[in-house]
Amino acid sequence: MKPAIDPDRKLTPGALQGLKVLEMGQLIAGPFAGKTLGEFGADVIKIESPGSGDPLRSWRLQLDGTSVWWQVQSRNKRSVALDLRNTQGQDIARQLIAQADILIENFKPGTLEKWGMSYEQLSTDNPGLIMLRISGYGQTGPYRDLAGFGVIGEAMGGLRHLSGNPGEIPVRCGVSIGDTLTALHGVIGVLTALYHRQTNGGKGQVIDVALYEAVFNVMESLIPEYSAFGVVREPAGSSLPGIAPSNAYRCSDGLVLIAGNGDSIFKRLMHAIGRDDLGDDPGLSDNSGRVARIAQIDKAIEGWTRSLQVNQVLVLLAAAQVPSGRVYTARDIAEDPHYLARDMLLSQQTREGKTFTAPGIVPKLSLTPGNIRTAAPGIGEDTDAVLAALGLSAQQIQYLRDKKVIA
């Protein structure tokens, strides 16, 4: 397994090297955006509350008292423990923002304005500032002041209603997908704004990303179908409504996913399972015909898979060039040779020297690939160095520490 942080290897300069990012968010959406920018070379300074730090530090399973999720989310970042509710802390934040290219924040709308940090105020000192603002419902609109988490955004965006089986309580997908989608949309906005700043006059701008809108943006034909046909799409379990065949099928020892929904793929699939009668049926030659008879098709496929093991099905369908796959668990991922070959499993260390396996970096750039340069920091580990770079003396830093403005 490739080490994530190897002091002896020469790192390729990241595509975003030289960019200064100030992260004033916590938990998932804002920090995931900062993580992504940091992996491609940006210098990310994370502001945390003195004492407690980002709550993600204690979420889920912990290694030596710190969440391994945090270790991945905060790699390549520096931590400054700064009390943003203190006026002196706000002054320091403004100094850091004045030197930043990008500010990431996921506070409740109006919080920065209350602290005297509206974009209009901040851009006076830093006209090139790009501010990524992540919230549940956006910076405007009748819901802007409501509390919003990823799970609520997934529900409002339409995703939760489609998750699960018909007639049952909708289920979550298992991870905080709404937060992550929002973060990725935020990164797209940041990169777009950087291009605009570089090519169109050097001005920064605000990027307003709402959790529910990021989810809604990937909901495919949900609204067009309602608009054109009055159809309210309903949950469909493991199948893909309107696309056939694409489903999960039982084998003798588990489940297999089969996507035989292309016209030529469907013929190859039917040949592989010994049902040339269906593959050659003119009524099943296109998707609309197959959708009308999906129950018959699914029954034929599962009649074949039930007599075989998952691995046998995968080998036979790979030979027939039919897309198929197993349902992966964490153990399956950790043992999969393709993950290893693609550097998607990295051996990462904590600051305390403990080693664990972490996800690799996506996307993969040929000339300026992403890197893990540093492990996730302790709370406020970089406070003194960052403030010294601002020009504060050791005496001034100690004064702020005594006043509990920093830690």
Image: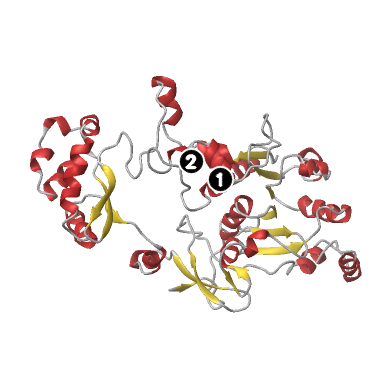
Neighbor class of circle 1 (other Cα within 10 Å; few <14, some 14-19, many 20+) is: many
Identify the residue at horizontal 16%, vertical 44% (top origin).
300
What is the secondary structure assignment of the residue under circle 1?
helix
The label number, if any, that marks residue 151 in the structure image: 1
Q: Which residue is mark 2?
A: 160
Image quarter for residue 140? top right
In front: 360, or 70? Answer: 70
Asked if marks 1 and 2 touch (Cβ < 8 Å), the reply is: yes
Q: Is residue 96 left or right of residue 57?
A: right
Residue 370, x across and y down, in percent: 52, 61
Q: Amino acid at mark 1?
A: Val
Identify the residue at horizontal 20%, vertical 60% (top origin).
315
Whichever of labels 1 and 2 marks the residue nearer the N terminus, that label is 1
Image quarter for residue 18? bottom right
Residue 229, x across and y down, in percent: 38, 21
Image quarter for residue 278? top left
What is the secondary structure assignment of the residue under circle 2?
helix
The colour mode here is: secondary structure
As drawn, 68 above or below 352 = above
Q: Is residue 363 left or right of residue 314?
A: right
As drawn, 344 above or below 324 = below
In front: 17, or 324? Answer: 324
The quarter in which the N terminus is drawn is bottom left
Identify the residue at horizontal 80%, vertical 41% (top origin).
113
Q: Is residue 374 visible?
A: no
Residue 101, x across and y down, in percent: 70, 50
CA–CA distance in space, label 1 to label 2? 8 Å
Neighbor class of circle 2 (other Cα within 10 Å; few <14, some 14-19, many 20+) is: many
